Image (cartoon, rainbow, N blue to C red):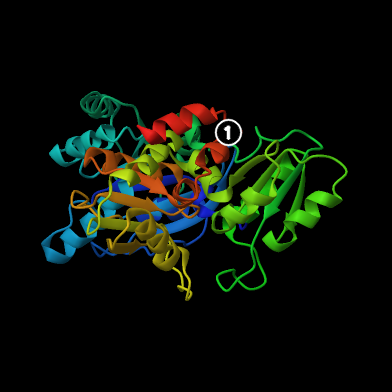
Amino acid sequence: MDNINTTPISSRLHIGVFGRINSGKSSIINALTKQPAALVSPVPGTTTDPVFKTMELLPLGPVVLIDTAGLDDKGDLGQMRIKRTNDILDRTDLAIMLLDATVGVTDFELDLIKVLRSKNIPIVIALNKIDISPVEESQLKKWQDALGQNLVKISAETGMGMDELIQEIIKVAPNEVLEVSLVGDLVKPGDFAILVTPIDAAAPKGRLILPQQQVIRDILEHAAISIVTKETELKQTLANLNKKPAIVITDSQAFHQVDAETPSDINLTSFSIIMARQKGDLAELVKGAAAVKNLNPGDPILIAEGCTHHRQEDDIGKVKIPRWLEKTVGGKLEFEWYAGKDFPADLEKYKLIVHCGACMLNKKEMLHRLSTAKTNKVPMVNYGVLIAYLHGILPRALQPFGYQSSVVSHQLSD
């Protein structure tokens, strides 16, 4: 089991708590975590921005609980809080809908459950404050019939019903959110996997970036052997091995050099493409790469990243990708950059979205971004897929995942 402090937030089940102001959302977070993780006050609207709290919820493993502002907040500030809460819905894997037993089921609760169901989010409904407002079974049945779902009676204040709530969460948790292995199906026990990790100005001092860490961990969990080298030592590394590696996985920025130095009978791909397969829809991102040939000078391009970081002089998203794209298109393009947990609502003006590897986003959120782009008829591609395409090696980079080189080449030329 991964340690609670080492599992990235992006790899955890995201459980959002939604409901009225002062229904006890912060209290239920504290009851589940058994610590004062969220500020509790009788003053309505205490929770402003969403609060994220990581914990271990067996047998689900590492999860992140999200405390949100009340969706019935009032005024201009309240509307801003509601917008942030609605944004959380797009990264929620499971929702705890909290009812206040002193209020019951109103049009507000009926509308809220419709919104949750419209987004296909599994729901657990908790009826809070039963310690101060006991509910007769006849009334409970009426509310359950109105919502079309059973209610779990709890008191976040006293801890009553919390075990039953946890069992209900475990019961409805979506299996598909437990993300597929990064490389477990690409290596067998005892296989060598070479990881090419350039150490340049953008590399964090004293550590590897998150995708590299996650891939190494996955290789070890599948009893394979990871060999980490820089691109400048790849040729020597290959020559020193006593058997052929099962796969070479490279940082996308070194794709061109690594492709040239890796024999054609060895599988080759990148960390970013591996992340694309785990977090989203690889086939859809390949379609996005094919859209590059339809770009013209002057077209607006969105470059989106799931996190914020200090940009280096030769930053991949700010400098290198724009340079490679403009060279391919044969003229200047209009670039806009967007970084962080939010995603622009207005995408229609863009001709292409270029997204990072999404190591800091969970699968739910990345699929939402892909879906939003598709709804707006804007193709999306990620860094690794795009870089492989621009260097003419995308068919090879997709072969480890069962893509036939001839088929990919045909798709890209259509």
Q: Quadrant of the N terminus?
A: top right
Q: In this view, does 53 lie above or below 277?
A: below
Q: Which residue is the extreme one toward the left?
A: 75
**Number of disc labels:** 1
Q: Name the residue under label 1.
A: 399
Q: Is residue 23 above or below residue 147?
A: below
Frontmost residue, 221 versus 320: 320
Q: Where is residue 266 in the image (x, y as percent from the top left)?
A: 70, 38
Q: In which quarter of the image is residue 21?
A: bottom left
Q: Position of residue 18 (x, y in %)?
A: 30, 47
- Residue occupying the point 79% across, 54% down: 237
- Residue occupying the point 52% across, 37% down: 395
Q: In this view, does 259 lie above or below 118?
A: below
Relative placement, left or right, of 183 versus 329 is right
Q: Quadrant of the C terminus?
A: top left
Tag 1: Cα neighbours inside 10 Å, few (<14), some, or many (≥20)? some
- Residue occupying the point 61% across, 70% down: 200
Q: Which amino acid does label 1 sit on?
A: Gln
Q: Position of residue 162 (x, y in %)?
A: 47, 42
At numbered mark 1, what does the secondary structure look like: helix, strand or loop?
Answer: helix
Q: Where is residue 195 in the image (x, y as percent from the top left)?
A: 69, 52
